[in-house]
């Protein structure tokens, strides 16, 4: 079953820019940027789609059960920065979950403000078209 998260524009970031940063920073949890070679410079954890008629809107194609391995030297600053709606307590909780484990399921770190959408929703809202 496929799952999506709609990504809203925030501050100066467009929906697409924010989706790219979120996915990139999730990738960096496993393999921090300073350890990556040139071929990994654009690597992301989850792909994204754009709405066919609302061109500025993006949605991440996610797997809430995907296990992310945590590198002991990972930094969460950029990931947390793209979620300004998080309270200080939520930021500490997110950091704690990630830094106190060797791995975690992606769904464990989703903020309360995030709604995971299913295929039926994405079809009904015009994000994807099913092949007839």
Image (tube, helix red, strand yellow):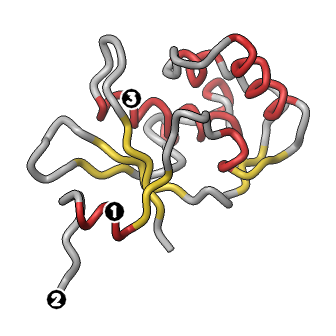
- Asked if 27 appears above or below 131 in the picture, the reply is above
Q: Nearer the viewer, residue 86 or 2?
A: 86
Quadrant position of residue 131: bottom left
Q: Find disc 2 in the rendering and name its residue.
A: 132
Name, please, the residue furthest toward the left. 53
- Residue 70 location, x and y as percent? 79, 40
Q: Is 98 left or right of 58, judged from the image as shown?
A: right
Q: CA distance from mark 1 to mark 2?
A: 17 Å
Q: Find disc 3 in the rendering and name its residue.
A: 18
Task: Looking at the image, tell me whether mark 3 or mark 1 is earlier in sequence order.
Answer: 3
Tell me the SS state at disc 2: loop
- Residue 121 image label: 1
Tell me the SS state at disc 3: helix
Q: Nearer the viewer, residue 82 or 31?
A: 82
- Residue 30 location, x and y as percent? 71, 41
Q: Nearer the viewer, mark 1 or mark 2?
A: 1
- Asked if 80 appears above or below 32 in the picture, the reply is above
Residue at position x 77%, y 18% from top? Answer: 92
Task: Looking at the image, tell me whether mark 1 or mark 2 is earlier in sequence order.
Answer: 1
Q: Nearer the viewer, mark 3 or mark 1?
A: 1
Name, please, the residue furthest toward the bottom. 132
- Residue 43 location, x and y as percent? 49, 43
């Amino acid at each position: 079953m496929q799952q999506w998260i709609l990504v809203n524009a925030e501050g100066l970031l467009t929906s697409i820019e924010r989706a790219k940063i979120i996915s990139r920073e999730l990738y960096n949890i496993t393999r921090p940027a300073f350890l990556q070679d040139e071929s990994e410079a654009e690597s992301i954890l989850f792909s994204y789609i754009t709405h066919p008629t609302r061109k500025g809107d993006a949605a991440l194609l996610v797997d809430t059960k995907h296990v992310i391995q945590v590198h002991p030297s990972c930094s969460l600053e950029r990931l947390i920065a793209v979620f300004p709606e998080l309270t200080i307590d939520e930021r500490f909780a997110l950091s704690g979950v990630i830094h106190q484990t060797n791995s975690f399921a992606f769904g464990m770190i989703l903020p309360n403000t995030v709604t995971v959408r299913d295929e039926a929703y994405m079809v009904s809202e015009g994000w994807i078209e099913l092949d007839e």
